[in-house]
Image (tube, rainbow, N blue to C red):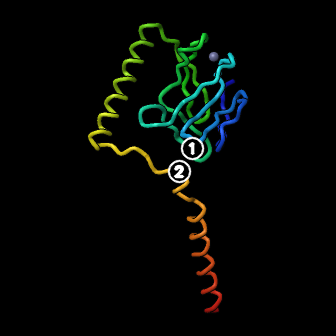
Amino acid sequence: METLQHKFVDIIPEYLENGILYISIPRRTALHKCVCGCGNEVITPLSPTDWELTFNGTSVSLHPSIGNWSFKCKSHYFITENRIKHSEKWGEREIDNNRKRDKNRKDQFYKKVEENKVKTITEPIAAIKPVSKWKKFLSFWSVNITKKGGIE
Ligand SMILES: [Zn+2]
């Protein structure tokens, strides 16, 4: 398996299919089955201190890499533009250091939030209302078309 297909979902399915990266924006989470084929489900929360998802219109990337240290396989890979790039497995010490770094990053982030230096997203996703934005766009065009028709 060298690629993953991304799939945007509102509700996270109960059974994940191999080779699909499920992305739920409302839940700010991405999920997929470990690419080694072990069957374990990998959950990657999307947040400033967890994973960052990039969608370029046709493919997605996750940053940083995915290290399944809690699984037996201990697989480690990058997902870049839907492609899987396997990386070296880490030893106990590297895993431990990474956990510490991760914790530090989180502590620092939440400290900034407390000090009001960083704003977290508290607005519910439904408040963005993309539909009304489209309606506005469409009505703008229909108005212009009507006007043009009137001139002629
Ligand atoms: Zn695995």
Q: Taking 6 as reference, is 140 above or below it? A: below
- Left of 27 or right of it: where is 110? left
Between the C-alphas of marks 1 and 2, the distance is: 8 Å
- Seen from this angle, which residue lies furthest bottom? 151
Contact check, label 1 and label 2, Cβ < 8 Å: yes
Q: Which residue is mark 2?
A: 125
Q: Amino acid at mark 2?
A: Ile
Q: Taking 76 as reference, is 10 above or below it? A: below
Q: Residues within 10 Å of mark 2 (few under 14, many from 20)?
A: few
Q: Amino acid at mark 1?
A: Ile
Q: Nearer the viewer, mark 1 or mark 2?
A: 2
Q: Taking 115 as reference, is 141 above or below it? A: below
Q: Which residue is mark 1?
A: 25
Residue drawn 33% across the image and 43% down it: 118
User: Circle 2 — which element?
Assistant: helix
**Image quarter of residue 115:** top left
Q: Quadrant of the C terminus?
A: bottom right
Residue drawn 34% across the image and 34% down it: 110
- Residue 72 on image: x %, y %: 60, 10
Closest to the observer, 64 or 130: 130
Mark 1 or 2, nearer chain start: 1
- Residue 91 on image: x %, y %: 47, 7
- Left of 125 or right of it: where is 108? left
- Seen from this angle, which residue lies furthest left? 115
Q: Taking 26 as reference, is 34 above or below it? A: above
Residue drawn 55% across the image and 35% down it: 61
**Image quarter of residue 98:** top left
Q: Whereabouts is ligand 1, in terms of quadrant?
A: top right
Residue drawn 58% across the image and 38% down it: 60
Q: Residues within 10 Å of mark 1 (few under 14, many from 20)?
A: some
